[in-house]
Image (cartoon, helix red, strand yellow):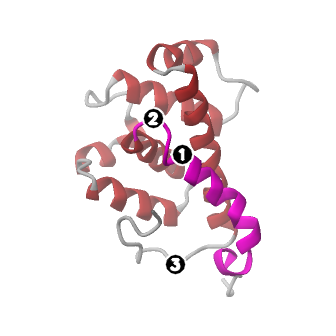
Amino acid sequence: MGQRLNIHATGQQAMKAVYGLGIYLAKSPVEQSLLNLVYYRVSQINGCAYCLDMHSKDLRAKGETEQRLFVLDAWREAPFYSARERAALAWAEALTKFSVGHVPDAIYEDARKEFSEQELIDLTIGVITINSYNRINIAFPAPVGGYQPGQHG
């Protein structure tokens, strides 16, 4: 693969829009550990190596267990995710893998049991944000492996 442009250097103006979403989400009532778990799961779905490296390191630095990270792609079968985490992961997957053109009612109802209206809006913005970063990093790959925990905020 040839050298691709560095979107974070060349596209600073464009990236400010995406960075703004992160600034907003840093103040969200949704716990950052849950948002990072969602970011990691969405990055698994999208195959974004840079984001997987980054979020796994940030999660581990904040105390997330290796076991939960190792089996996250099979969270439905694993016993160590809370109802709130399960609702968030199902919501994130439904928004990332469109199959019916809308979030299925059962997933919406489970999410509404666990999240306030504001939290569900913020969770949705979080899923949109990580999907955007995944697509940017897939189009313009950043070097993988050098990320240090907390480097981006």
Q: In which quarter of the image is the C terminus?
A: bottom left
Residue ID for mark 1: 25
Q: Nearer the viewer, mark 3 or mark 1?
A: 1
In the rendered image, residue 119, in percent from the top left (x then y), is placed at 52, 28
Q: Is the magenta stretch mostly helix, strand or loop?
A: helix
Disc 3 is placed on an element classified as loop
> Which mark is first along the chain, 2 or 1?
1
Callout 3–callout 1 Cβ contact below 8 Å: no
Callout 1–callout 2 Cβ contact below 8 Å: yes
Q: Residue at x 32, y 48 (%)?
A: 69
Q: How far apart are marks 1 and 2 (CA)?
A: 8 Å
Residue ID for mark 3: 143
Residue ID for mark 2: 30
Disc 1 is placed on an element classified as helix
Please state the extent of the stretch shown in magenta in the rendering: 6-31
Which residue type does callout 1 highlight? Leu
Q: Distance between the residues labelled 3 and 2?
A: 30 Å
Residue 58 occupies which quadrant of the picture?
bottom left
Q: Quadrant of the N terminus?
A: bottom right
Farthest residue, direction front: 27
